[in-house]
Image (tube, rainbow, N blue to C red):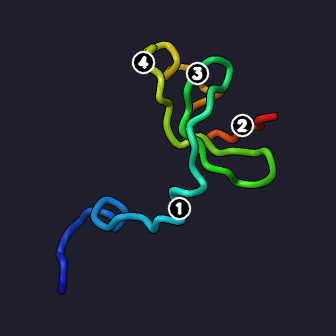
Amino acid sequence: MILYTSMPNEWIYQAEPSEFAKQKVVNFEGIPLLVELTSGSEYRVIQVMSTDPNDFMNENIGPGVKITLS
């Protein structure tokens, strides 16, 4: 099958189930975050899961930022 589209592959095809195994929801400084384990106790923020609009303005927890959990 040939699919002609300008959209990235990630938007069309589902990720492998093993990608979801590395993700979890954590509370970081009272803010729920969806994170992905990168190494040891270091995580990369994927999504801010908060309902407070002010939490989205915090640059320390934005998507792509690496955080350390103890």
* Residue at 49% across, 13% down: 54
Residue occupied by mark 3:
31
Tag shown at residue 19: 1
Q: Are marks 4 and 3 in contact (CB under 8 Å)?
A: no
- Which residue type carries mark 4? Thr
For the residues labelled 4 and 2, the Cα–Cα distance comes to: 20 Å
How many neighbours does mark 4 have within 10 angstroms: few (below 14), some (14-19), or many (20 or more)? few
How many neighbours does mark 3 have within 10 angstroms: few (below 14), some (14-19), or many (20 or more)? some
Using the rendered view, name the quadrant where residue 66 is placed.
top right
Helix, strand or loop at mark 3: strand
Lower position in the chain sequence, tag 2 or tag 1? 1
Residue occupied by mark 4:
51
39 left or right, relative to 20: right
* Residue at 82% across, 34% down: 70
Where does the image place residue 39, in percent across and percent down from the top left?
77, 54
Tag shown at residue 4: none
Residue occupied by mark 2:
67
Position of the N terminus, as image quadrant, is: bottom left
User: In this rendering, which labeled residue sits more in front, label 2 or label 3?
Assistant: 3
- Which residue type carries mark 2? Ile
- Which residue type carries mark 3? Ile
Helix, strand or loop at mark 4: loop
Lower position in the chain sequence, tag 4 or tag 3? 3
